[in-house]
Image (tube, grey):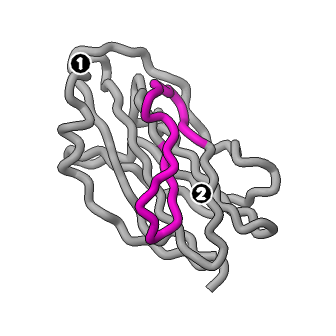
Amino acid sequence: MRGMLRTRITSAAGAVTLLTAGLIGLSAGQADATSRVNHCGSSYGFLKSWAIKDGWYPNPTVGYIDVYYNSSNGNNCVITRANDSEVGGANHIIAGIRKSGSSTWKLDGTNSNYTSYAGPLYVYAAGSCIDIYGELNYTSGGTGAGGGRTVYEDVHCG
């Protein structure tokens, strides 16, 4: 089933409260839009972007998890980026990837304060599927805070 894309969303809306604790009152200016850029390398082809949704109504898309694949070596690559049309002052951006069935995530950004993207991260998963993870917190107009956290399982099976 090489190159097949499957998506199954794992709900993480309850984690938003934990993610945003302590951010109320922070102020940051509106950043330039973070467009999709291939930071994985020229041998990696873009597969798809998966949305990171805010946990609060109306659930805008606050970021994306971009997945790339290198068919010559079987490696997958992931980048998490903010959607600055919805998010002002994005920070605490985290990217994650693992081979499906593994309990060990490769993570970037957990001890950092990235403002536009996290990653790239790589995992070999030829003949298997991958799970991806994206998270970000942000301030909105300097008056409040929000965040999004999303895990997608079995997104690329190669």
Q: Earlier in the sequence, mark 2 or mark 1?
A: 2
Q: Residue furthest bottom?
A: 1
Q: Nearer the viewer, residue 132 or 144?
A: 132
Residue occupying image coordinates x 67% and y 43%: 37
Residue 100 left/right relative to 2: left
Per the image, is 145 magenta? no
Residue under label 1 = 143
Tell me: residue 70, above or below residue 2.
above
Residue occupying image coordinates x 24% and y 32%: 20
Q: Give residue 68's position: percent from left, percent from top.
A: 65, 58
Which amino acid is tagged 2? Val
User: Circle 1: is it few (<14), some (14-19), or many (20+) Cα within 10 Å?
Assistant: few
Q: Nearer the viewer, residue 129 or 101?
A: 101
Question: Which quadrant of the view contains residue 39?
Answer: top right
Q: Give residue 8's position: percent from left, percent from top.
A: 38, 71
The answer to whether marks 2 and 1 mark residues whose Cβ atoms lie closer than 8 Å is no
